[in-house]
Image (cartoon, coloured by chain):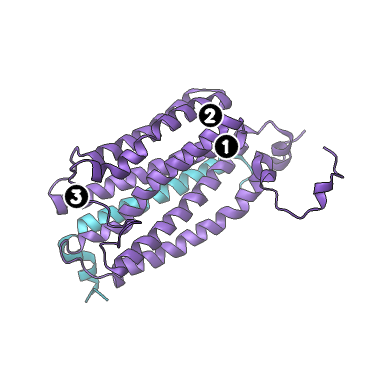
Amino acid sequence: MSSASPQAAVPVFNWFKYASPQTFFPLAGALAPWFAAIAAVLCVAGLYIGFFVAPTDAQQGESYRIIFIHVPAAWMSMLIYLAMAFWAGVGLAFNTRLSGMMATALAPTGAWFTFIALWTGALWGKPTWGTWWVWDARLTSELLLLFLYFGFMALQAAIDDPRRADKAGAVLALVGVINIPIIYFSVQWWNTLHQGSSVSLKSAPTMAMTMLTGMLVMVFAAWAYAIAAALWRVRCIILERERRSDWVRAYLGTAR
Amino acid sequence: MNWGSVSEFLAMGGKGLYVWGSYGVAFAVIALEIGLLVMRRHAAGKDQ
């Protein structure tokens, strides 16, 4: 606790400094607008490439252009779940308050992206397969993901004590992680109506370069948006949960 | 450039309903999420 510790002179960036809600609150507030701006710029660029540069698909015609929103949303639905489960697990293991808040902040954004993936998938399935929905492994496991997000949020909302809510939610989130590889590999493990991956780390993408570029730009836009939304939400959660603490009272001007 | 006119762009080769239905709902959802965040932040206090 001594301020004259020998380490104090070493100019290293201390990440743990931002592990408390009080120190993370202003950092999140400073970072969020930047991620939002990056998201907006990338979104405009990605949609421009997607609609005006990328050519018409030889097989599907114009309906394939749904890919520029469908694939980023579907990837984010899985990635946000992994991030949520990661923070939930960190909170469970180290009993850090901010980790649980981060997990709680990510859940609604993940659920929205899951809904977008399912909705755009249905609107893509109709002109491509002739049906809005099939109970194939990819679609069913993605729907299960939406219910996992709902379950996480409902469970947390049902428990009054935030620390207990964090713990209960964390167990659910960690058990549900098993669904993520099932979604990802479903198109390989089962014979699905849903097509296989167009992009893979192991082989060359099976798409035109401009299509791939537009899709990846939209993926980064979705990524930046999700970070901005989660940072904004975690700031709300910090204020709500810590409103009786001295620093929040001072910040809000409600100190006696 | 893929489109000869605005109406051609909106028609999306006859798939306009599906393409714009996807993007319309997706961006409506994002706008809704941002709106809910603004309201929540406002309720939490000292929103500038």
Q: Alpha carbon of mark 3 to alpha carbon of mark 2: how far?
A: 37 Å
Q: Secondary structure at mark 1?
A: helix
> Label 3 marks which chain's residue?
A
Q: Which numbered circle lies on residue A34?
A: none
- Colour cyan maps to chain: B
The residue depicted at 69 percent of the width and 38 percent of the height is: A248
The residue carrying mark 3 is A125
Answer yes or no: do the residues labelled 1 and 2 have beta carbons within 8 Å?
Answer: yes
Mark 2 = which residue?
Answer: A166
Chain of the residue under label 2: A
What chain does badge 1 belong to?
Answer: A
Q: Which chain is purple?
A: A
Residue type, numbered disc 2: Asp
Whichever of labels 1 and 3 marks the residue nearer the N terminus, that label is 1
Residue A91 appears left or right of A200: right
Q: Position of residue A122 (x, y in %)?
A: 22, 47
Give the residue type that dot 3 points to: Gly
User: Quick one: quadrant of the C terminus of chain A?
Assistant: top right
Q: Farthest residue in the front direction?
A: A202
Q: How many residues crowd around disc 3 within 10 Å: few (fewer than 14), some, or many (20 or more)?
A: some
Task: Name the residue at 29% across, 37% down.
Answer: A141
Q: Quadrant of residue A63?
A: bottom left
Q: Position of residue B29 (x, y in %)?
A: 37, 48
